[in-house]
Image (spheres, coloured by chain):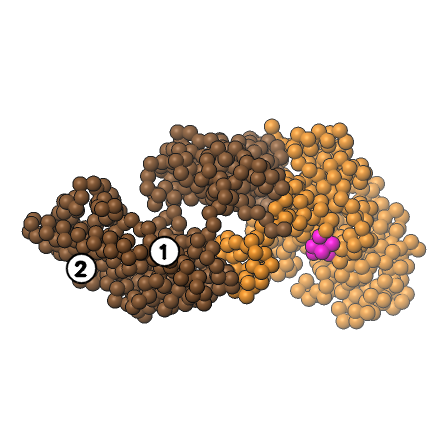
Chain colours: A orange, B brown
Amino acid sequence: MPDELYREVLERIKPSAVEDAHMRSVAHEVIDKLDSEAREHGLDVYTIHVGSTARDTWLKGKKDIDIFLMFPPDTPLEKLKEDGLRLAREVSPRFEERYAEHPYITALYKGLDVDLVPCYHVEDAAHIQSAVDRSPFHNTYVLKHIDGLHDEVRLLKQFTRGVGVYGSELRTQGFSGYLCELLVLKYGSFDGAVEHGAGFKRGRVIDIEGHMDKSVEHPDPLIVIDPVDPKRNVAAALSGQKFCEFVDACRRFLKAPSIDFFFPPAAEPMKKGALEGLLASRGTKLLAITFKTPDIVEDTLYPQLRKAEDSLAKLLERHEFKAYRTDVWSNDRSAIVLEMLVWELPAIERHLGPPLDEREHCEKFIEKYPGAYIMGCRYVVDIPRKYDTAVELINAQLKSCGLGKHVCASIGQGFEILTNEKTLELGPEFARFLTKFLRAPET
Amino acid sequence: MPDELYREVLERIKPSAVEDAHMRSVAHEVIDKLDSEAREHGLDVYTIHVGSTARDTWLKGKKDIDIFLMFPPDTPLEKLKEDGLRLAREVSPRFEERYAEHPYITALYKGLDVDLVPCYHVEDAAHIQSAVDRSPFHNTYVLKHIDGLHDEVRLLKQFTRGVGVYGSELRTQGFSGYLCELLVLKYGSFDGAVEHGAGFKRGRVIDIEGHMDKSVEHPDPLIVIDPVDPKRNVAAALSGQKFCEFVDACRRFLKAPSIDFFFPPAAEPMKKGALEGLLASRGTKLLAITFKTPDIVEDTLYPQLRKAEDSLAKLLERHEFKAYRTDVWSNDRSAIVLEMLVWELPAIERHLGPPLDEREHCEKFIEKYPGAYIMGCRYVVDIPRKYDTAVELINAQLKSCGLGKHVCASIGQGFEILTNEKTLELGPEFARFLTKFLRAPET
């Protein structure tokens, strides 16, 4: 295995002694501060540093750190929130209140974002009251078993990041840091994880503790049973697409290892001339339906964008147009992007009427359309096509085609369909996206 | 009910007294001739006049008549054929030997084609040795029950003929004469048959004798249990399309009875200018794949033409082209005719590779196509489209796309693809076919 390559990667991703010391001292100071505040207010709180910075599996450049404030399990939820946030606000005068499953505070402290998360200090992971209560158990488990594999975890995190499958948030639907840690624990090294990963089939089960609760079904491409919770799949957020992309990356890496897997060259922004040439040679048409990005977090935004992408693809298909590929993009504006294979159609279309058996409906249909005829045991009729082009169809029906709440509201306020090289008006970040989106065909 | 209309129809379809007398005398003479020949050769044969001319349900202009030569059931098959055909050849010096399930003779006798069919004289229809043995039982059954409904049967035959669903041969897959007779027996009149027909749903069972053998499944749109055979569906040859067209015709007739249902005006041949105008306004493209008609009977030809039509439609679909409607036509040349909705496509296509799980296949695929990527848990790759137009695709792959034996041989010897107005080169009969094929859209 390419040790030289790994050394080169680690040089770029392993925190320096200075960074590491700073991270530790910040954690220490914040915990001290919280502990003394808690004592002052007579609160029974156990503060703990969790996450990759606590486990020494973090990657250079990381600017945030997780500190949990653990309250006794019999604390009323309102009191936990109130006391927890009050303590947290004391850490730094610069803070923001945020919301996940619970509210938490992000404090800016000595150049780091410190997430301060109140949770319950339960006895074992089976008794958690919410997902955040589980994090300290993950921390304990990894610390207990990591046994010098910190850099192996770093390699796997950077590998998944480089090949585009790192991050369990809904934008990516990829591998979480904890999932990377567990794969390294299971297979003993980065190499082991990649070698096994290359052979993963859909539905692969990894159950390190051998305690899987078989009464729970996991309809996921990869099932990694949480060592601290036999019912939970750590990889539940991983999409089939990202699972497959990971397996593919493992196979390609094994065949020809290279630094590019860890640090892929940045995509060049697509230039106008190149785009015109590419579309001319392919003969396809590019459409970007753009609108103002709703002011919501990515975990809310991306599912809505994908829903819009799906609804739009189905709308086009119902009307006999054909998209070759679709994707979504977001910045200050958002876009549903389609490369179209069929975007113009002849002036007639077949309008489907009722099945022959529904006699009353049939009579009304024939009355309305005297030229109706039989096809496949239902009445049909040829009518002038209502939307001859995909653009006309989208303009007329996008708003009513099944959109998430915020995307719908934004589109309702106005959208624009950019075509071909005009899509570049969305700016250089979009131009970079286009380079990846429009793969050049094999010759 | 429109009695005046029926009188008008019957005037045109009921044989005159002269025709009727001629038909009867021919049957009589032929039977006499066969009987005396049989006596001369010492053969135990019972000759019988069967079919619509025997039952007085035939339509004016009919030029053929069926005489069956019934041999004792213990006659060896070879002897039945030999003696039967030898007798039959005596009827007229002008005859042809033909083959259905059994060989038979068509003799030209006083201007009529007399089909002379050897069969077994079995005791009841349950003991028939082949389908032809059943005909005399049908004859007996109808004669016994028809009870003055002869003209009602004639009306139904002409109605089904006029609306294009008469004939149980494989070209039409419509209603046989016997089926029309049974529907009139069941519903008591032409009106009754049409009123009930208008309400037929797929899977309708008509069991006049109430003796249906329920152990036999009939996956047909209409099930009319043969009064002489509880296992047999008289309507087995009826296609779903023709069944629905009949129901539709009944409904329209009830709403607005007219002579046109019985005698539809002949379609005008499509003229060049009209065709150009129609195609320009619709924006579709007409393709006719033409080849020399194989020298085989229609019952063999039409299934092969339809198979070719199906295979061609599937071929086009697999390659992302789209036909709006398809049909077949045949004369001295045959044609698969398509009105195309999508007949040109962009220069790229997606080539599907193996599913991710088949690792060895995947490795070979990636080696061949380094630009392969993951889509829907399989590898795919963008390649230059091999056939940019439907015509190129058909030229390249028609011969290998699944054709019946004789059509395949004929296409193998050469075919031509005519487009748009050039299809009119196939002649005026084709031009008439086109008028029906290309229905004008509703406006």
Name the subunit of mark 2.
B
Image location of residue B214, percent across then percent down: 33, 66
The image quadrant of residue A255 is top right
Say whether residue A440 is magenta. no
Is-magenta flag for residue A398?
A: yes
Looking at the rendering, which quadrant does residue A352 occupy? bottom right
Of the image marks 2 and 1, the number of the one nearer the N terminus: 1
Are marks 2 and 1 in one subunit? yes
Q: Look at 70% across and 56% down and name the residue there.
A: A402
Residue corresponding to mark 2: B122
| Mark 2 and mark 1: Cα distance apart in space | 35 Å
Residue at point 56% right, 59% down?
A: A366
Q: Residue furthest front?
A: B18
Give the residues drawn in magenta, as a range: A397-404
Q: Amino acid at mark 2?
A: Val
> Which quadrant is home to the N terminus of chain A?
top right
Whether residue B132 sits left or right of residue B367 in the image: it is left
What is the secondary structure assignment of the residue under circle 2? loop
**Chain assignment, label 1:** B
Dot 1 falls on a residue whose secondary structure is: helix
Above or below residue A217? Residue A346 is: above
Give the amino acid type for the residue marked by disc 1 in the picture.
Ile
Q: Which mark is residue B13?
A: 1
Q: Nearer the viewer, residue B5 or A12?
A: B5
**In which quadrant is the C terminus of chain A drawn?**
top right
Left/right of residue A254 with respect to residue A376 in the rendered view: right
Name above or below for residue B143 compared with residue B77: below
Q: Name the residue located 62 percent from the left edge and 61 percent from the top edge.
A: A231
Name the spot of residue B400 as percent of width and height, x first: 43, 35
Q: Position of residue B180 (x, y in %)?
A: 36, 60
